[in-house]
Structures are given as structure tokens and as C-alpha cells.
Image (cartoon, rainbow, N blue to C red):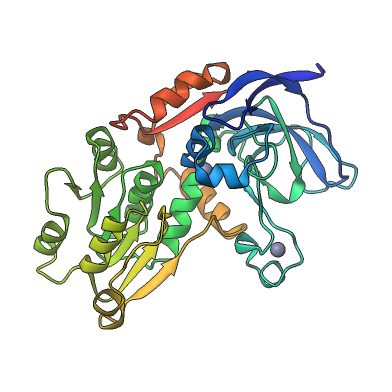
């Protein structure tokens, strides 16, 4: 095996990234595995790191390889690894739990007190190889294409958001038009939500929301969101709101359109501290608020596999662009155009 590999690194504490050669990582613990990456996908977190915003400046230590969503094949295993073997197709739960904090000891590894994130706190997967602990490997069906395998991590965010929100037979409004919101539309429909109302901003993405099965779409550029949802629900609002943008105005809409006794599920991450109408939007409504972080380990992954392998949800309309890893810069430009005329952008790795 060669000693170095193609990798996308954050070398400077400034905007941008470098496509370069880096040493192939080595297994350090007997519980580690080496994965040959086959496909990876670009996420909003990668954009934060690329553009070197305030959050990245405080969190990222350079030089590092970033990226966290991937599909690959096990190339080597540590001496104590038992659950996976060389040749297995895997994706990664990107949140590495510590295994000994109160959350980890009570089946809540996804909100581990000492969470370490692949491609944020340690080297990530925009490379030909990565080393991770066996504990975060998720075995894929060998028939699952690597590019679909790579989007299971964000698909899992959508799955966890929908699964926690009791959407079966209920009116659901999903706010957001990014890939995770689009996956949530398909999943909510598969879970029996009716109708699924999807709120978006960018036309190309609203089209994707339609392809994923939204019964109604609302464009925030052309419509009054609150009025429009109220019109579709006889003035009562929806049973469930899935807020997937983190924008203050979207949270405000969400708390207005959730029906009394309904559920507001928060997945989007606000940039600052949003003002919310706790009395009118939550207390007097007797509404539930649920917070979603990551994916349940591994409940969510089983659900993702069942739904994808059965074909109940076809995620392919969300994947709009493919680039080889070496063209990372072009892929970033395609992902973050001002008009967001793309869905998920996937990178393939030779
Ligand atoms: Zn991600
Ligand atoms: Zn822990």
C-alpha cells in the first residue's frame, strides 16, 4: 500500500481548504479500523470549517482533514476488533461517544458528555483513508451504492427528527429546504404524516421537496408562511412542526403554526440566541418541544437501513451533483451558490 493519500485539509487558519497529499493514517488502538473511503458528501458543518467562521476558529485545530459523511470499505482492523472485518462496507456514526459518562451508561451515547466528532475534533473523511474506532462503524448492505451510504448520516438526522415526533396520521409542517429537510419530507410521508407541508426558500430546492413527496410546498419568497399553513389547516395549525433551519424567523413561524397540544421539534441550530414567544407559542398552547442532536446509536441507523433497503424512501432526488474528491473546490462552489441551486453534493474517491 502507498504511504500517502489524497486529502482535503484545513492547513491555514483562514478561509479555504487545500487539496493535497497526506500520510495514510495508522491504526493506533487495537479497537481501531482503517477505512478506504469510496464516497463522501458535503455538509453545512464543512462549510463552517471551510469559511472559517467564529465557531470553527474556536473549535478546529489545524492542520486537519475535515469531512464526516462517508461510505467506504474496511481495509484493516485492530487486533481486538470483532464486529467488523476487512472487506465490510461501512458508514460512520460521526459522533464518537466516550462510553463512560452518565449519558453513555444510560443508552444515550448520541448526547455523550465528552462527544468527539469526526472531521471536527479529529481527522475526517475527505481523504482516501480514515482511522476510527470500531464502535462508530455501521455495516452497510453490500448492494447499497457507496454514494447512498455516504448520505445515511444526514438521512439519519432526518430519521431521528421524524421518528421522535409522532407524525403518523398527523399534519406535519417541515421548515427548511436543505438536504436534511428534504429527507425528512420523504421519511415523514413514509411514516404516514398527512399532509406534509414543506416550507422552503430556494426554487431548485422547493422542487426537490416536491419530488420527495411534499403534499404542499410554501415559498417564503412568495407566500405568507403562517397564513398559508393556517389556511390549509382550517385555522388550527399543524400537529407537528419540524424546524430544520435554526433561523429566528422560522422558529417564530413554527411556534405560531403549531396547533395547541402539538409538537415543535427543533433540529436547526440558531447562530445566536433567538427570541421565542414561550407564553403564546408553548405554555398556553400546552405544546411539546423536542431537541434533536445527531442520531440514536444505533436505533436510528437500523431505521435508516430498513427504510432505504426497502425502497420506502428514495433519497436520490436529493443528490444533485457528483464530483471526484480532487475537485473539492468545484464541489464546494456548487454546494454553496447564493441561490442554493443544488441538493446534496457527493464526492467520489478512487
Ligand atoms: Zn453532516
Ligand atoms: Zn459519554
Name the foreground residue: 327 vs 295.
Answer: 327
Name the foreground residue: 276 vs 12.
Answer: 12
Query: Residue, x 67% and y 40% (percent of image)?
Result: 61
Name the foreground residue: 284 vs 64.
Answer: 64
Quarter of the displayed picture in which ligand 2 can be seen: bottom right
Vertical arrangement, residue 195 with respect to residue 223, above or below = below
Query: Residue, x 36% and y 48% (percent of image)?
Result: 181
Q: Does residue 65 appear left or right of residue 233 in this picture?
A: right
Looking at the rendering, which quadrant does residue 226 occupy?
bottom left
Q: Does residue 151 appear left or right of residue 313 in this picture?
A: right
Query: Residue, x 34% and y 65% (percent of image)?
Result: 167
Q: Is residue 320 visible?
A: no
Vertical arrangement, residue 129 with respect to residue 120, above or below = above
Residue 148 appears at what percent x and percent y? 50, 35
Count of numbered circles on the image: 0
Vertical arrangement, residue 25 with respect to residue 181, above or below = above
Residue 200 appears at what percent x and percent y? 25, 45
Q: Quadrant of the C terminus?
A: top right
Residue 63 appears at what percent x and percent y? 69, 31
Q: Is residue 339 visible?
A: yes
Q: Does residue 32 appear left or right of residue 10 in this picture?
A: right
Residue 220 appears at what percent x and percent y? 18, 47
Amino acid at each position: 500500500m502507498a504511504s500517502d493519500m489524497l486529502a482535503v485539509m484545513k492547513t491555514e487558519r483562514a478561509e479555504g481548504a487545500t487539496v493535497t497529499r497526506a500520510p495514510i493514517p495508522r491504526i493506533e488502538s487495537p479497537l481501531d479500523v482503517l477505512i478506504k473511503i469510496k464516497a463522501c458528501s458535503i455538509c453545512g458543518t464543512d462549510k463552517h470549517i471551510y469559511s472559517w467562521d467564529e465557531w470553527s476558529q474556536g473549535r478546529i485545530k489545524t492542520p486537519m482533514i475535515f469531512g464526516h459523511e462517508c461510505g467506504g470499505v474496511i481495509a484493516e482492523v485492530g487486533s481486538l476488533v470483532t464486529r467488523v472485518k476487512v472487506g465490510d462496507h461501512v458508514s460512520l456514526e460521526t459522533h464518537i461517544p466516550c462510553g463512560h459518562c452518565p449519558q453513555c451508561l444510560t443508552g444515550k451515547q448520541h448526547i455523550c458528555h465528552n462527544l468527539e466528532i469526526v472531521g471536527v475534533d479529529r481527522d475526517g473523511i475527505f481523504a482516501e483513508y480514515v482511522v476510527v474506532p470500531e464502535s462508530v462503524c455501521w455495516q452497510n448492505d453490500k448492494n447499497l451504492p457507496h454514494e447512498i451510504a455516504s448520505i445515511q448520516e444526514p438521512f439519519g438526522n432526518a430519521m431521528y427528527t421524524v421518528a421522535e415526533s409522532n407524525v403518523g396520521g398527523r399534519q406535519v409542517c417541515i421548515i427548511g429546504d436543505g438536504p436534511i429537510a428534504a429527507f425528512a419530507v420523504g421519511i415523514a410521508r413514509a411514516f404516514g404524516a398527512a399532509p406534509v407541508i414543506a416550507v422552503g426558500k430556494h426554487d431548485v430546492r422547493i422542487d426537490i421537496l416536491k419530488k420527495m413527496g411534499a403534499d404542499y410546498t410554501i415559498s417564503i419568497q412568495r407566500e405568507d408562511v403562517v397564513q398559508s399553513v393556517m389556511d390549509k389547516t382550517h385555522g388550527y395549525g399543524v400537529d407537528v412542526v419540524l424546524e430544520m433551519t435554526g433561523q429566528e424567523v422560522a422558529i417564530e413561524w413554527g411556534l405560531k403554526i403549531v396547533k395547541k397540544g402539538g409538537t415543535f421539534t427543533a433540529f436547526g441550530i440558531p447562530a445566536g440566541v433567538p427570541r421565542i414567544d414561550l407564553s403564546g407559542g408553548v405554555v398556553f398552547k400546552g405544546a411539546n418541544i423536542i431537541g434533536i442532536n445527531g442520531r440514536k446509536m444505533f436505533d436510528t441507523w437500523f431505521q435508516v437501513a430498513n427504510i432505504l433497503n426497502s425502497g420506502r424512501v428514495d433519497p436520490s432526488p436529493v443528490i444533485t451533483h457528483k464530483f471526484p474528491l480532487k475537485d473539492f473546490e468545484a464541489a464546494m462552489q456548487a454546494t454553496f451558490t447564493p441561490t442554493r441551486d443544488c441538493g446534496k453534493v457527493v464526492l467520489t474517491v478512487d
